[in-house]
Amino acid sequence: MIKHPHKILISKNKISKRTAALGQKITRDYQGKDLVVVCVLKGAFMFCADLIRHIGLPLQCEFFGISSYGAETQSSGIIKTTLDVSSPLHGKDILIVEDIVDTGLTIDYLIKTFSMRHPTSLKVCTLLLKPECLKTKVTIDYCGFEIGKNFVVGYGMDHAEKYRNASDLLLLFPKKR
Ligand code: IMP
Ligand code: MG
């Protein structure tokens, strides 16, 4: 049964400040590089749209669709590509932009997928990381916030495709899963 989310975990103001700081850091790190931001759909669309407005570089923005959860709050472990990027990425400096790294299986899959395309460099930026849930060792280059095990929605993130339009990051269930 879906309970209505109510509690704000991270406010839109906090998200906005942290996103600006990440954008400024990325701007410094990617001077003179051929930056391609790969927005992982659907969950990262809102974060990525805000983040790239804080990156002061002539970047290319691509979209990569992936689905791994279905209507459950636990990863199904089955990762499905739903949309590929629109141009070749060899020789580019790829920055994968994710909403959240939970078990790490999805980002691991994405890193492997994009490494095979021979980029000059490949890094990961995620708004959220759940360190206690990691099941595989992954390197996260830019992270907005580390959070606990709770399932979160809003600011692009969903539960059964709902709540993506909330401006704040919300806790779906008050209790830990
Ligand atoms: P992982 O493969 O377990 O790391 O899960 C990564 C993906 O699952 C993320 O890109 C999200 O789309 C989704 N996900 C994981 N945890 C949450 C959550 O708390 N709320 C919403 N989506 C989540
Ligand atoms: Mg995602």
Image: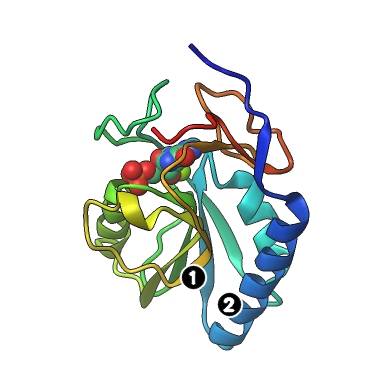
Q: Residue furthest front?
A: 175
Q: Secondary structure at mark 1?
A: strand
Foreground of the two, 171 or 58: 171
Give the residue number, with chain letter if any, for mark 1. 142
Task: Give the residue type that dot 1 points to.
Answer: Tyr
Q: Earlier in the sequence, mark 2 or mark 1?
A: 2
147 with respect to 105 (left or right): right
Can you tell which quarter of the image residue 122 is in? bottom left
The reply to whether callout 2 and callout 1 are in contact (CB within 8 Å) is yes
Instruction: Please name the residue shown 67% across and 66% down the image.
Output: 18
| Distance between the alpha carbons at the discs numbered 2 and 1 | 8 Å
Task: Return the mark for residue 26.
Answer: 2
Most distant residue in the top direction? 1
Q: How is the image coloured?
A: rainbow
On the image, the x and y values in percent for residue 66 come to: 40, 38
Residue kind at label 2, given as amino acid type: Ile
Q: Residue at x 72, y 50 (%)?
A: 11
* Badge 2 element: helix
Note whether 78 is above or below 119 in the view shown.
Answer: above
For label 2, the crowd category at 10 Å Cα-Cα, with few meaning under 14, some 14 to 19 and many 20 or more, is many
